[in-house]
Amino acid sequence: MSGDFLEATYDKFIFRVKKDYLYHPEECWAKEEAGLVTVGVTDFLQKSAGDVAFLELPEAGTEVARGGEAGIIETIKTTITLIAPVAGVIKEVNVALEDNPELVNADPYGEGWLFKVVATDWEADQRELMDAGTYFPLMKEKIERELEKK
């Protein structure tokens, strides 16, 4: 399984970055397949924020701007504003999260996806996002800063 991921271990936690996804610095990912861009949150975000208790996601048909607000995640520790990594129209929302928000923690790169977008300019969005190799050292810096606070 780790062949699909870049991994960093800190204390007892393993932080994973899915290799074939693109990343926004506000801790969300994007993966384009068949004309739709699936969006979720990073493993770093879900581990550092804590157990997800509630999600407020945009409805299908809602237009989102790249870098704009795209919902809210409430955890046991904090409330996080979700940022859209791409511009477009929401096509589908992960309805499984309504009854099982913990899927975001259990499988942030799979069953815990948040929504799918019909991107208005995927080519431009891709240029603004980071590949896994670029995001990975940024994530490690964030982890180290968090550890220094403790």
Image: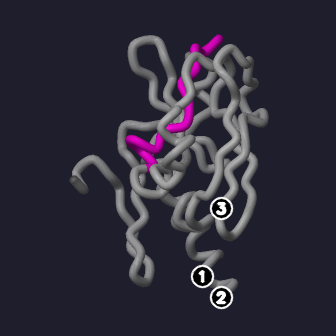
The secondary element bearing badge 1 is classed as: helix
Of 71 and 95, nearer the camera is: 95
Percent coordinates x, y for residue 87 in the rendering: 68, 21
Residue topped by disc 3: 75
The secondary element bearing badge 3 is classed as: strand
Which residue sits at x=70%, y=41%? Answer: 56
Label 3 vs label 1, nearer the camera: 3
Q: Which residues are magenta?
A: 108-121
**Would you say the residues marked 2 and 1 are in contact, meaning their CB atoms lie under 8 Å apart?**
yes
Neighbours of disc 3 within 10 Å: few (<14), some (14-19), many (20+) = some
Q: Amino acid at mark 1?
A: Leu
In the image, is 101 to the left or to the right of 59? left
Percent coordinates x, y for residue 121 in the rendering: 63, 13
Please, is residue 73 above or below residue 88 in the view?
A: below
The secondary element bearing badge 2 is classed as: loop
In the image, is 139 to the left or to the right of 65? left
* Quadrant assignment, res 76: bottom right
Of 4 and 115, nearer the camera is: 115
Residue topped by disc 1: 147
Which residue sits at x=65%, y=51%? Answer: 54
Please, is residue 18 above or below residue 117 in the view?
A: below
Which residue sits at x=67%, y=48%? Answer: 26
